[in-house]
């Protein structure tokens, strides 16, 4: 992993940033993110898929391998689910030194209503072997990463693959998946960081040995050095974000607001447990007050909304928000550095000038 202490952005980072856009924070106002505002992360190229030739295979350590067309999948009982997805690299560009990869600030986030077939249904039809350990999900896209040529593959332990309400989704917000979000099929793993939500899903492979593919054994590990094995990135840590109040300065995106009463609003989520508390600070994180939290969806890993009254006085202010989930996990005030720049859920800071 290359690192940079240069505050300037490299061309490689700029190219990644232009391919993979974030969700503009004002879109936190929508409970379901409109598709074009949902963040995007595409490691390699978006594949062009012919829907009549497309097949999903369920194979490996199963009693009855399946080869399914899109029609076969749509003929099965469907389930809908609202799920918030965040890239594990969200917050990476705020680390110092900065890992050279997709340079996210805080906006690698979105929430969609997914429709598809429960993964558990397909695994049950196929019949898992008693020795099954992991389930591997492969996309159609190929590339080279860390000098390894590969197709994009991630795995889940069998217990999560069966128990975590995973969906093999063909619809996003009531329409077929668009090409950039995985047409014609993607995996949705509620609560897990984005990387496990494999797009352009074409193969579900059950294996009897722990999967050691690049995106599990090398990428997406929290560690301080290349030599260290570290721990895998799995479920989303708690995070709260606010809709920046007032109006933005074009270049800096600092906010300009009028004095008086403001209803600050935002959304919060955690992939580990429901959100227990959201707090807001109007003094740069020195003191916090409780926001009012509203659960809009029954789905356990959909974000929730919050509001907070702010009586804005003239001057310069730094607003912060932080979430705590029901396990007691709370967002840190300062980033916790790691080599890949994963899981940086340090509190958001929004500079506001009140006139
Ligand atoms: N096949 C495939 N699936 C993929 C990826 C990819 O590059 N290829 N990117 C992953 C990552 S890192 C993230 S954060 C999410 C992004 O999903 P989105 O673009 O639909 O928001 O997709 C995941 N699934
Ligand atoms: Mo990601």
Image (cartoon, rainbow, N blue to C red):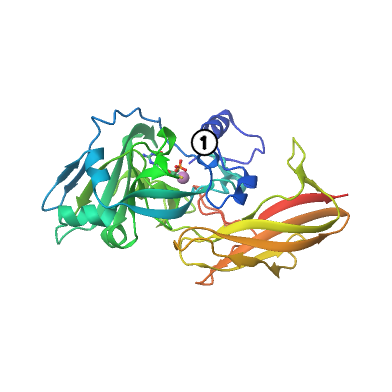
Image vertical order of residue 18 relative to residue 260, above or below: above
Image vertical order of residue 183 relative to residue 295, above or below: above
Q: Position of residue 15 (x, y in %)?
A: 54, 29
- Image point (34%, 33%), residue name: 141
- Image point (73%, 58%), residue name: 263
Q: Position of residue 350 (x, y in %)?
A: 72, 51
Q: Residue reaching furthest left?
A: 63
| Mark 1 CB near ligand 1 (8 Å cut) | yes
Residue 189 is drawn in which quadrant? Answer: bottom left
Q: Quadrant of ligand 1?
A: top left
Residue 72 is drawn in which quadrant? Answer: top left
Q: Position of residue 14 (x, y in %)?
A: 58, 31
Q: Position of residue 301 (x, y in %)?
A: 46, 60
Q: How many marks?
A: 1
Position of 117 compared to 323: left or right?
A: left
- Image point (11%, 50%), residue name: 64
């Amino acid at each position: 992993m290359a690192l940079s202490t240069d505050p300037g952005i490299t061309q490689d980072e700029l190219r990644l940033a232009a391919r993979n856009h974030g969700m503009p924070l004002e879109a936190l106002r929508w409970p379901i993110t409109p598709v074009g505002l949902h963040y995007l992360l595409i490691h390699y190229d978006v594949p062009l898929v012919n829907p009549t030739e497309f097949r999903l295979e369920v194979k490996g350590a199963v009693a009855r391998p399946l080869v399914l067309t899109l029609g076969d999948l749509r003929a099965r009982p469907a389930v809908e689910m609202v799920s918030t997805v965040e890239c594990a690299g969200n917050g990476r560009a705020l680390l110092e030194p900065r890992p050279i990869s997709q340079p996210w600030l805080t906006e690698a986030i979105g929430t969609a209503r997914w429709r598809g077939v429960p993964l558990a249904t397909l695994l049950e039809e196929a019949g898992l072997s008693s020795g099954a350990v992991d389930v591997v999900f492969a996309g159609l896209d190929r590339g080279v990463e860390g000098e390894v040529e590969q197709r994009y593959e991630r795995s889940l332990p069998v217990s999560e693959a069966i128990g975590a309400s995973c969906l093999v989704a063909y619809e996003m917000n009531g329409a077929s998946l668009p090409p950039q979000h995985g047409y014609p099929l993607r995996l949705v793993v509620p609560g897990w960081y984005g990387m496990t939500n494999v797009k352009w899903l074409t193969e579900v492979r059950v294996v009897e040995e722990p999967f050691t593919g690049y995106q599990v054994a090398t990428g997406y590990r929290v560690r301080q050095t290349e030599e260290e094995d570290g721990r895998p990135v799995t479920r989303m840590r708690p995070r709260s974000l606010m809709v920046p109040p007032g109006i933005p300065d074009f270049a800096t995106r600092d906010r300009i607001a009028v004095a008086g009463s403001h209803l600050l609003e935002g959304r919060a989520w955690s992939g580990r447990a429901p959100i227990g508390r959201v707090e807001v600070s109007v003094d740069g994180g020195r003191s916090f007050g409780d926001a009012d939290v509203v659960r809009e969806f029954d789905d356990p890993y959909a974000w929730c909304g919050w509001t907070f009254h702010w009586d804005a006085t003239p001057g310069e202010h730094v607003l912060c928000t932080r979430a705590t989930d029901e396990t007691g996990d709370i967002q840190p005030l300062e980033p916790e550095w790691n080599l890949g720049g994963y899981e940086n859920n340090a509190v958001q800071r929004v500079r506001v000038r009140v006139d």
